[in-house]
Amino acid sequence: MARDNGDQPDLIVVIGWVLLSLIFHRSKVEPLLLGKAAIASQLLLLAYVLLSVTFTGLPPVHDAFIILTAGLTAVSGLQYIYKDLNLQMPPKSGIEIEAVQKDSLAEQAGLQPGDLLASINGHKLHDAIDLMFHRDLDNVDLEFYRSGQKHKITLPEPEETDLGITVKPFKVKTCKNNCVFCFVKQLPKGLRKTLYLKDEDYRLSFLYGNYITLSNLDCRDRKRIIEQRLSPLYISVHTTNKALRARMLGALKACDIMKELEYFASNR
Ligand code: SF4
């Protein structure tokens, strides 16, 4: 490869690398970060080769860069081959099965503790609420991962109501407020650790009645609350004066609570 102008990288090989990576990226599999890095590196190398054809006297490409490009390309290619063999990376979302009841639907279908449920009836799963919401009694198609391998099953007797699984608890969204009256901050030291968790999670509000301030909702959360009719939610209002509420919550970006409440009320 390019050590000097008389020993340029093989143009055809570099173009081949670029085309190969573009083909990978146009395939249906998700683009991987390494694939992108490989393409960027290949494009840089290609640009250098084209420049060196036009201009003489360019400094040689450093060996390390050529090795890096080749390495990225090789690893990226292996990742795609890995994917094509159906050995997909586990999805970012999903819920892990903690336990499977004896003689349950789940056991009959072959589900095991540790399996990662990715989707039900075509809907991605993020937590147990999704699992309950997207269950369809006439048809329960599940997609799950075991040891990195994807599986699809249809439950044998979907008319039964309980799948017979316990799932691991979801990661709780925490509170970014700094209320002047925060009861968590006022707790004495030495209590059990979970008591110091400042939770601010609409799912806990729906499931267990925890109070929330709505200050960490994003668009997806709002959409989901309405779509899945996650009601009632228990909301700490304190005051409807926006500036005063922001001061009380110690959160300059605290939402306009009246707008939030009107939004949910009008989308019931
Ligand atoms: S909302 Fe306020 S009181 Fe509740 S945990 Fe957060 S800071 Fe503490």
Image (cartoon, rainbow, N blue to C red):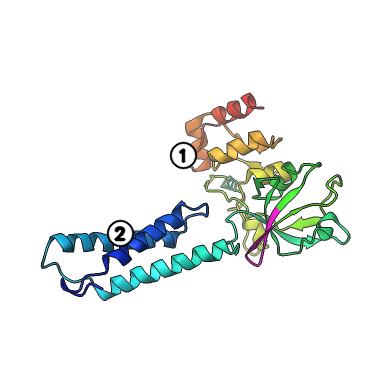
Q: Residue furthest top?
A: 266
Span highlighted in magenta in the image:
143-151
Residue 240 visible? The answer is no
For the point 45% across and 40% down, the residue is: 252
| Residue 175 position (above or below residue 88) | above
**Quarter of the view holding residue 21:** bottom left
For the point 24% across and 59% down, the residue is: 47
Q: Quadrant of the N terminus?
A: bottom left
- The residue that disc 2 covers is 43
- Please check the rendered image and state whether residue 104 is part of the magenta-colored stretch, yes or no: no
Ligand 1 under 8 Å from disc 2 Cβ:
no
Please indicate whether residue 212 sits to the left or right of residue 4 in the image.
right
Residue type, label 2: Leu
- The residue that disc 1 covers is 253
Compare residues 199 and 169 and report the one nearer the observer: 169
| Residue 128 position (above or below residue 53) | above
Q: Between disc 2 and disc 1, whose residue precedes?
A: 2
- How dense is the environment of label 2, judged by Cα within 10 Å: few (below 14), some, or many (20 and up)? some
Q: Residue furthest left?
A: 57
**Quarter of the view holding residue 56:** bottom left
Q: Secondary structure at mark 2?
A: helix
Q: Position of residue 48 (x, y in %)?
A: 22, 62
For the point 47% across and 58% down, the residue is: 32
Compare residues 1 and 155 and report the one nearer the observer: 1
Compare residues 172 and 88 and report the one nearer the observer: 88
Residue type, label 1: Lys
Distance Cα–Cα, label 2 vs label 1: 42 Å
